[in-house]
Amino acid sequence: MNIGRRLTGLVVSMFMLLTAFGCSTATEPKTEEKWDREVDFLIVGYGLAGEAAALEASDIAPDASILVLEKMPETLAGGNSIASGQTFIVPSESGVEGFKEYIRNCNEPNPIPEEYLDFLATEFADQIKWVQGTVNAAGYEVGYVGGGPLRWGSLVVEFAEFPGAGFEGTSAHIRKEGSGAFENGGVWKGFNAAVEMRDNIEVAYSTPAIDLIQDPQTKAILGVIAQDPEGNLIRIKANKGVLLACGGFENNLEMQRNYHGMDTVYTAGTPGNTGDGIRMLMKVGAKMWHMNNQTQSGGFWLGIKVPEYESTFMRNMTFKSGAWIEIDSDTQRFYNESKDYHRQHMKYVEYGRYVDLPHERALPVHLIFDDKLASSESVASQWLSWPITTEGYVWSKNNEDEIAKGWIIKADTIEELAEKIGRDPVELKAAIDRYNAMVDAGADSDFNRDPATMEKIDQAPYYAVELTPTLVATTGGAQRNTHSQVLDWDGNPIPNLYEAGELGSYVSNLYQNGVFLSEAIASGRAAAQHAFDGKSTVTSVVEAGSNEEKPADPKLEDGKYDAIYKGQHGDIKIEVTISDGKITNVEAVEGKEFLFMDDTQLSDYIQAIIDADSSEVDTISGATLDCQGISAAVKEAVKK
């Protein structure tokens, strides 16, 4: 099978390897190449793009030998795809042209070739059948935003004012079959389960690729130099090609400073993305693109960096309490900090265009809050970011564990807090006094923050946590064509070299939610199809793409029925009331404190269920996890 196999067959000494070949692609190869291992298709990186490529290659050529080299250990595999929000986007066939127009506008002012847009739109619309068929066979299923079967219109468009934004489409995720609930890392896990069923796919963990081996005359890529778990360098020949699907450079501060000009930035995704693929691509003469777009396409989010983890936690996207502000290097508020910027991947409008939030220019930045917030809700997202999705950390809901660890600074007075975080006590007190005065006045005269989100910071103890820009992805890499072939500076494919996923992404400016994962699937499959000169015929047992109406719930008997929604920090008991055969009330009768959504969001979602007389309704933006859990619980309750 594919996990934990040792890479064997060393036939040359390490001394001869290093002196004769080194780690440079410029070295002249011997007349007769010597290899430690030979495979048909070699994939570098085991995120979603690598999974999709391996599965497509296996579908086309079940007898081919497919090897995936993964830098991280098995327990930390998954790339950024396992730490992502798990959404992939699916335009309908009739929505393809509108989707193309929308993405064309997102990419401005850095357009990509029109044929690339055609490829993305048609593949995104078509590949859902392959996705369903692939994960169904492994005990997983595709779920859609709003629940139920595929139907169009259940998606969040981030830039609704752009032409084409009204395209017909939906957002999807992957979960265990029959679970009915969103699953952290579900997309990667579903594909991984499918990989584990294939005898001709091997995954070698803790085995990073060090260099590409290139023929100096033809420029063709012959194979890869890798390092096995024992530290030995090994040469692996790839008969049909090498696919680089090893992510970007989020966790390489030197590259960030050189290619994007950011002084300090971390990753909220895999710490393994240190630009390995970019370095290898540059050495073989690839044409680089999207290294420094107008924006960090996936946005830099607001992270909380602690010594115990290499990747950051993410600041909670929304707070129920309003007793908080953010301050910049001058100990002043510097923007409207309460808006839902995550709905545009942390962009805001400046001079008529969307740009990144100002944090990287305002460092150091601190989140300042009082005990009303600290004792009632987590300051960090409890479902998004690598330490949570992959390393299993659970941030305490009242922050007491993180305060005890020293991640959050606590003080009895504002002045004491200022001293502990290296701020001027007079300046911090003045900033908070000014904010509190605007709360009393009922208007934010500085940044027009919604008064409904403002509450006085006046209940001791007081707290601070430092915020840092944190990346979910970069898009820089080599330019690739629609076969995922890497191009050189003359626009010609480098023979036998492919690239997929976020490395060299087609996204060239603003990012629409769901595009990265859909692109990972499409570009990984395209590479395998070209390498093996074919295309998978796998389709879903449930035909996708039909504009299927959501089914009505069956006629129900009057009474009260309950079911449990298992939240991340406790069970929520949902009670459904049926009167005259219809749903007339839904209530969280136990465990309401474990919901992340606020009372208004809960009320709106319940009313939507009542109005539709169905559990199959669209989720509330900003409360997707809870909505999906409640929907599944309502569905389970009415079955009784």
Image (cartoon, rainbow, N blue to C red):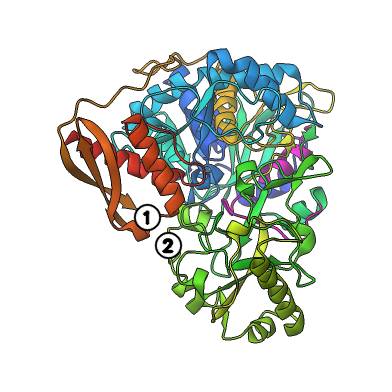
Which picture quadrant has residue 523? top right
Q: Is residue 64 depicted above or below 138 in this figure?
A: above
Whether residue 279 appears in magenta in the rendering, the answer is: yes
Chain part drawn in magenta: 261-286
Whether residue 308 appears in magenta in the rendering, the answer is: no
The image shows residue 591 at horizontal and vertical percentages of 30, 58
The image shows residue 443 at horizontal and vertical percentages of 69, 61
**Location of the C terminus (image quadrant):** top left
What residue sits 60% from the left and 16% below the top? 96
Q: Is residue 566 left or right of residue 438?
A: left
What residue sits 55% from the left and 48% below the top? 71
Q: Is residue 365 depicted above or below 276 in this figure?
A: below
Which picture quadrant has residue 124? top right
| Residue assigned mark 1 | 568
Q: What SS does tag 2 mark? A: loop
Q: Which numbered disc covers residue 394?
A: 2
Q: Report the front residue among 12 and 518.
A: 518
Q: What SS does tag 1 mark? A: loop
Q: Nearer the viewer, mark 2 or mark 1?
A: 1
